[in-house]
Amino acid sequence: MKKSIVVLLMITGLVVSPKMIFAQNDADAKAKPAKGKGDPDVKAAAWVATLNLTDTAKATRVKQLITTHLTAVRDFYNSHDYTLVPEGINPVTGKVFSKLDRQVIINSTIPKTVHTDLMDGLKKELTDNRWK
C-alpha cells in the first residue's frame, strides 16, 4: 500500500508538472520545443545522474527506460480525463465524488505493463539494490 501511494504521488507530480516551454524564435518553435524541466528526457537524465553509473552505455539504456516510462505515463494521463469516470457517490463517505476522486480512479486504470516494463528493465540493468 505504501509503495502504491509513493508511485501515485510520483505520477501525480508528473501530471501537475508544467507544460513544455517552447523556444522564443518562431522558426525554432516550429522546428522543435525547448526542453523544460518537466520534459521526460530532462527528468530521466537528472534521475540517472543521481545513480552515478560509470558505464555510459548502461546509463543511456537506463535513461531510455525512464524516458519511455515517463512518456507513457504522461500520454496516458493526457488522454484519460477525469470526466471518463461518471459522477457518483463515494460509498465510504456518502458524498459525491470530487474531481480529484474521479481523477484518482481514472489514473488507477493505467495498464500494469507501464510499471512492470520499467521495473523489469531496471532490474536487468541495475543489478544492485539501486532499482528498488
Image (cartoon, rainbow, N blue to C red):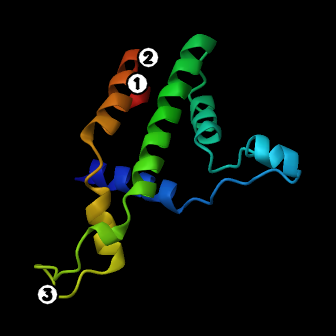
In percent of width and height, residue 120 lies at 33, 24
What is the three-letter code of the residue carrying label 2?
Glu
Give me the C-alpha separation between circle 3 and circle 2: 47 Å
Give the residue displayed 60% in from the left and 41% down from the top: 43
Quarter placement of the C terminus = top left
Amino acid under label 3?
Answer: Gly
> Circle 1: is it few (<14), some (14-19), or many (20+) Cα within 10 Å?
some
Q: Nearer the viewer, residue 131 or 58?
A: 58
**Classed neighbour count for the residue bearing mark 2: other residues with Cα under 10 Å, few (<14), some (14–19), many (≥20):** some
**Element under label 1?**
helix
Q: Which residue is mark 1?
A: 122
Q: Which residue is mark 2?
A: 125
Q: Secondary structure at mark 3?
A: loop
Image location of residue 20, percent across then percent down: 66, 53
Distance from the alpha carbon under mark 2 to that under mark 1: 5 Å
Q: Is residue 87 above or below residue 115?
A: below
Of 49 and 32, which appears nearest the observer?
32
**Residue 63: assigned label:** none
**Residue 99 lies in quadrant:** bottom left
Q: Amino acid at mark 1?
A: Leu
The residue beneath circle 3 is 94
